[in-house]
Each structure stands twice: as C-alpha cells, then as structure tokens.
Amino acid sequence: MLSRLSRFLTFRPTSYPVFSTSVDPTMTEVAVFASGCFWGTEHIFLKHYPPNPEPGKGIVSTAVGYTGGKADVSNPSYRQVCSGSTDHAEAVRIVFDPKVVGYEELVEFFYRTHDPTTVNRQGGDTGTQYRSAIFTTTPEQATIAQRVTEEVQAKHFAPKGTKIVTEILAAGPWWNAEDYHQLYLFKNPGGYQCPTHRLHW
C-alpha cells in the first residue's frame, strides 16, 4: 500500500508537459509542421511523444507560431494571420532528440494526424493559415520529407483516389504565437480541437 502511494506521488500527472532541460541543445534538431489549428497539432504530438517522465519519447520542447508568410510581414499577430492577409501558416516548432526519435517517424506521424488532401482547410477551419505544410530545416530533411510523402501517398491515399497537397518548403522566419496559445489544450482541456487531429491509421 505504501509503495503504491509513493509511486503515485512520484509520478503524479501534470496538466501540461514538463520539458527537459538536461538535453544538450547541440544534439537536437528542429522540425516544423503545419496541419490546421496549431493547438491541436501541438497537442497530438505531445500526447504521443511526451517529454516526461524523462527520458521521454524524443520531443524536447515545442512552440506554436507563425511561418511561411509574406517576407515584408514580421512578428504577425493572431488577428493578422487569421485575416489571411499575411499568408502565414499556424504551425508547431518541435525540438527533438534524433537519438530517440527520427525525423522520418515525425513526418509520418504528421500525416497520420490530419487530412493532407484539402487545400487551405482542416475540418471546418478554412483559410491559408490552416494549410498543410512541412517546413524543412536542412537539405536532408527535405529529402526525407519528400520520400515519406511519396510513400504515404502510395500506401494510404492513392487507393482512395485522393492526393496529398501538403507543401514541402525550406523553413523561413519563425514567429512565436502569443503566450496564451502555447500548450493551449493542455491548459484548457475543454478547448476547441479540430476533428481531423486524430490518428487516421
């Protein structure tokens, strides 16, 4: 009884992830994905690749924000992005440990957890900010993203007669979203979540 109680107190769940500070930042990589409302994109990645208890499943930290927009627009606000005038996508920036989880696996998971066949749309959310996109941070990532996309298309979408429309682009400037967006669905479990953010296979 005492040992069970001790274990419960030691591993008491938290309402939102606790990110590690012990991982050497020089040994990490960055992945950037856009798949509709960034609340849900961040939430589903962290549910399946939780950083705690350590050593976690490979994700070291995340941030939601804006990228892929017009070059003359810097540090856009949520309102600006939602207007469609800046062309930015809502995205999640994932710092991960490649010794624990590979980029290839993260790209496939990205495809598993949204509908990559709709242009500028996820579920009822429409607009350029909700487009499906992979923003690569290295030439190697670009090669992997293209290969995985072709494999996923052939296995999961061609048999249904649908086509992936996800953009694969070199990552450009990144702007963190406002603080209240960060880890939103962990802090607000009853908040809005796009119905496409689930495991599709």
Image (cartoon, rainbow, N blue to C red):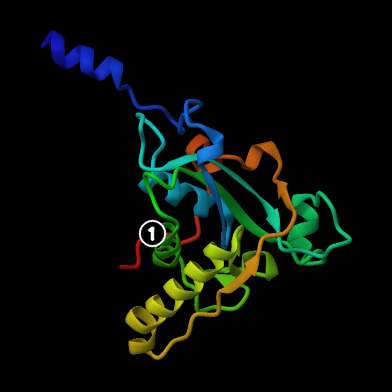
Position of residue 76 in the picture relative to residue 148 (left or right): right
Residue 57: image location, x then y, percent: 36, 42
| Outermost residue, bottom side | 161
Q: Which of the 4 image quadrants contains residue 171?
A: bottom right
Residue 98: image location, x then y, percent: 43, 47
Along the viewing direction, whichever of 178 and 149 lies nearer the viewer: 149
Q: Residue type at mark 1?
A: Glu
**Residue with the mark numbered 1:** 105
Classify 171 as above or below 9. below
Residue at 34%, 79% (x, y): give it.
Answer: 156
Residue at 59%, 65% (x, y): give it.
Answer: 139
Residue at 76%, 58% (x, y): give it.
Answer: 81
Position of residue 5 in the picture relative to residue 17 (left or right): left
Secondary structure of the residue carrying numbered label 1: helix
Position of residue 178 in the picture relative to residue 94 (left or right): right
Q: Which of the 4 image quadrants contains residue 99?
A: top left
Along the viewing direction, whichever of 126 and 31 lies nearer the viewer: 31
Residue at 51%, 32% (x, y): give it.
Answer: 24
Position of residue 166 in the picture relative to residue 43 (left or right): right
Q: Quadrant of the C terminus?
A: bottom left
Along the viewing direction, whichever of 134 and 79 lies nearer the viewer: 134
| Outermost residue, right side | 72
Residue 167: image location, x then y, percent: 60, 73
Q: Quadrant of the N terminus?
A: top left
Classify 58 as above or below 71. above
**Crowding at mark 1 (Cα within 10 Å: few <14, some 14-19, many 20+):** few
Classify 100 as above or below 112. above
Along the viewing direction, whichever of 54 and 63 lies nearer the viewer: 54
